[in-house]
Image (tube, rainbow, N blue to C red):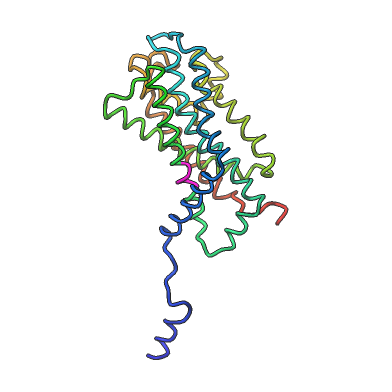
Amino acid sequence: MTTTAGATGTGTGHRPPSLLSVSRVRARVELLTFLREREAVIFTFAFPIILLVIFGSVFGRQELEGGVSFAQYFVAGMIAAGLFGSSFQNLAIAIPIERDSGALKRLAGTPMPRSAYFVGKVVLVAVIALVQNALLLLIGVLFYDLDLPGSAGRWLTYAWVSVLGVTACTLLGVAAASAVRNGKTAPAVISPIAIVLQFISGVFFVFSDLPAWMQTIASVFPLKWMTQGMRSVFLPDGYATQEPAGAWEHGRIALVLAIWSVVGLVVAVRTFRWRNKADG
């Protein structure tokens, strides 16, 4: 009995912290690190707002078919683009930089569960997306006559499109981070991809006005379906007839985003690197 008790009491005598508590600490670190980088904070939240103001000022008075102003159409697209930028673009650039600095290598060598690192990133993405969407909604309502959803059904659509879209884009951002050679080239590789997808996915232009081949390419990627889902939330029901398929296609939106979530998860799990290639 003495031996057993002694064996049980070896070490520090304390249980290791739970995954939940470690993840909470990691999420706090991620948020504090982000907030201390003032330039990144300003750019992350100001850039979508600047685009909204510029495009809204130039094209805001144009009225589209179905009695919808371009400003209303554009706000819905920018909300989706904000979710895309705060998840895919943010992670695909930030993770390679952290890998180059050796931060990931040091974290991998600590007792911290590796899953806590990803939980921290997910919390960071969620907070940025929530704040960014709130700002875009506020500006859209105050200056561009954006009508907030008037029914529980529309808010529910807003919620599941946001959750599925952010999930897919977050996982794809982690996966894309492994494909980027190093942190220095990450912005040069990822930013053009994000910009092109925004142009062909119905963010800056009316999607049905784009050439058919652009629509086909955009339909492969999640951002097109996120923008379409957001239009179904913030634009009148009658505008669905102006979509290429003549309907909002909620079922297809959910299916495409779910498929991309699975693809992103599989690729991220198989390819994620904690060390720079130079470290072996």
Label total for image: 0
| Residue 241 placement (x, y as % from top left) | 38, 14
Q: Is residue 83 above or below residue 123?
A: above
Q: Quadrant of the N terminus?
A: bottom left
| Residue 45 placement (x, y as % from top left) | 50, 33
- The residue most toward the bottom is 2
| Residue 176 placement (x, y as % from top left) | 59, 41
Q: Is residue 19 above or below residue 136?
A: below
Q: Residue at 28% across / 24% down in the picture?
A: 150
Q: Residue at 34% across / 20% down in the picture?
A: 147
Q: Give whichever of 107, 170 is nearer the camera.
A: 107
Main secondary structure of the magenta stretch: helix
Q: Is residue 272 magenta?
A: no
Q: Is 109 positioned to the left or the right of 159 in the image?
A: right
**Magenta segment range?**
121-125
Q: Quadrant of residue 3?
A: bottom left
